[in-house]
Image: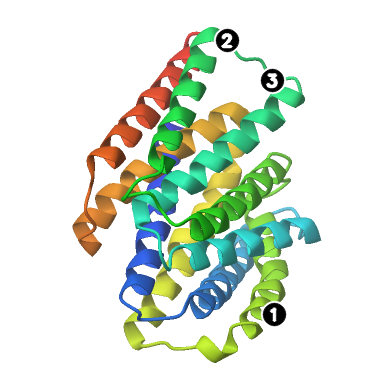
């Protein structure tokens, strides 16, 4: 399970780096990136679904849940628009900090238990996000931060729905198919801003066809075996990976504020995981 979680988190971080790399260098506009991301995901997942269906001795039904397609579309669009002005690691901190808060609140409202160490870890991780957002020269744009928060709420809703997914592959495939029209329609609102080169095209396709589609199937399979609080907390490792990726591949600077915020978030995650292991 730990190996699967690690792979999923690396893929999530890769999405942040790929998107920011494409948009920061103006290789593609955010809506074209979103559209290519979701369509390439549909293409890859359709192939995987056909293969799985041929190799299965029992029928694999498709799970058409319109709300899940909408959640996925809102997440993808908000994610891309926000990364126009936010660094990869900072955006991931905002995204998954919002995810954690949303999923934890939902879990607590639905009877999940929390002990002192778990609570301390959650609070510490959220304070780490707060440190990032404190006013100052390095604070991210409020408008683009809000777009990422909206994206985070949508991803949290998508993850919560995955808890009851009957079949991770068929559910993810259905969700991508349903998300595609929403993303394409949103793209028409920004049609005048369309621009794309070959590298931007390839980055979007890799994001959708590999770092999104396959990783989301893996994530849905993981969600069936962990609770909501655990699911929300392990995702807070993604910003730290994204910060490293942003520094290595995009040349983004790592400020003292980001280091402090990331350290608090990671330590909070360790507290939650340790508390779960000792239950």
Q: Residue at the spot x=59%, y=27% of the render?
A: 229
Question: Which residue position holds label 3?
Answer: 112
Question: Which residue position holds label 1?
Answer: 185
Question: Which residue position holds label 2?
Answer: 115
Inspect this view and state whether residue 279 appears: no
Q: In the image shown, does 142 or 90 lie closer to the viewer? A: 142
Q: Does dot 1 land on a helix, a strand or a loop? A: helix
Quadrant of the snapshot with the C terminus:
top right
Q: Does dot 3 land on a helix, a strand or a loop? A: loop
Q: Is the C-beta separation of discs 2 and 1 under 8 Å?
A: no
Please tell me how crowded label 2 is: few (under 14), some (14-19), or many (20+) other residues with Cα within 10 Å. Answer: few
Check the image and name the residue furthest to the front: 136
Judged left or right of residue 128, residue 156 is right
Q: Position of residue 112 (x, y in %)?
A: 69, 20
Judged left or right of residue 156, residue 194 is left
Instruction: Reply above or below: 171 against 209.
Output: above
Q: Position of residue 33 (x, y in %)?
A: 48, 75
Q: Position of residue 269 (x, y in %)?
A: 43, 26
Q: Is the C-beta separation of discs 3 and 2 under 8 Å?
A: no
Please tell me how crowded label 1 is: few (under 14), some (14-19), or many (20+) other residues with Cα within 10 Å. Answer: few
């Amino acid at each position: 399970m730990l190996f699967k979680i690690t792979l999923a988190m690396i893929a999530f971080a890769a999405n942040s780096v790929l998107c920011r790399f494409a948009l920061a260098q103006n290789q593609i506009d955010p809506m074209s990136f979103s559209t290519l991301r979701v369509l390439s995901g549909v293409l890859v997942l359709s192939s995987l679904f056909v293969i799985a269906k041929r190799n299965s001795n029992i029928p694999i039904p498709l799970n058409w849940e319109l709300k899940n397609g909408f959640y996925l579309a809102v997440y993808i669009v908000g994610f891309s628009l926000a990364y126009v002005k936010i660094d990869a690691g900072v955006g991931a901190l905002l995204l998954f900090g919002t995810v954690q808060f949303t999923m934890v609140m939902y879990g607590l409202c639905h009877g999940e238990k929390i002990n002192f160490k778990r609570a301390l870890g959650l609070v510490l991780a959220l304070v780490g996000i707060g440190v990032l957002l404190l006013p100052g020269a390095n604070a991210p744009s409020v408008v683009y931060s809000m777009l990422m928060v909206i994206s985070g709420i949508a991803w949290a809703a998508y993850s919560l729905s995955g808890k009851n997914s009957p079949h991770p592959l068929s559910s993810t495939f259905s969700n991508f198919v349903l998300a595609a029209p929403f993303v394409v329609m949103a793209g028409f609102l920004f049609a005048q801003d369309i621009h794309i080169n070959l590298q931007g095209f390839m980055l979007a396709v890799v994001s959708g066809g590999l770092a999104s589609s396959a990783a989301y199937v893996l994530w849905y399979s993981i969600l069936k075996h962990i609770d909501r609080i655990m699911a929300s907390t392990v995702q807070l490792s993604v910003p730290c990976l994204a910060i490293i990726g942003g520094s290595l591949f995009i040349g983004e600077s790592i400020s003292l504020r980001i280091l402090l915020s990331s350290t608090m978030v990671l330590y909070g995650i360790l507290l939650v995981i340790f508390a779960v292991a000792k239950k």
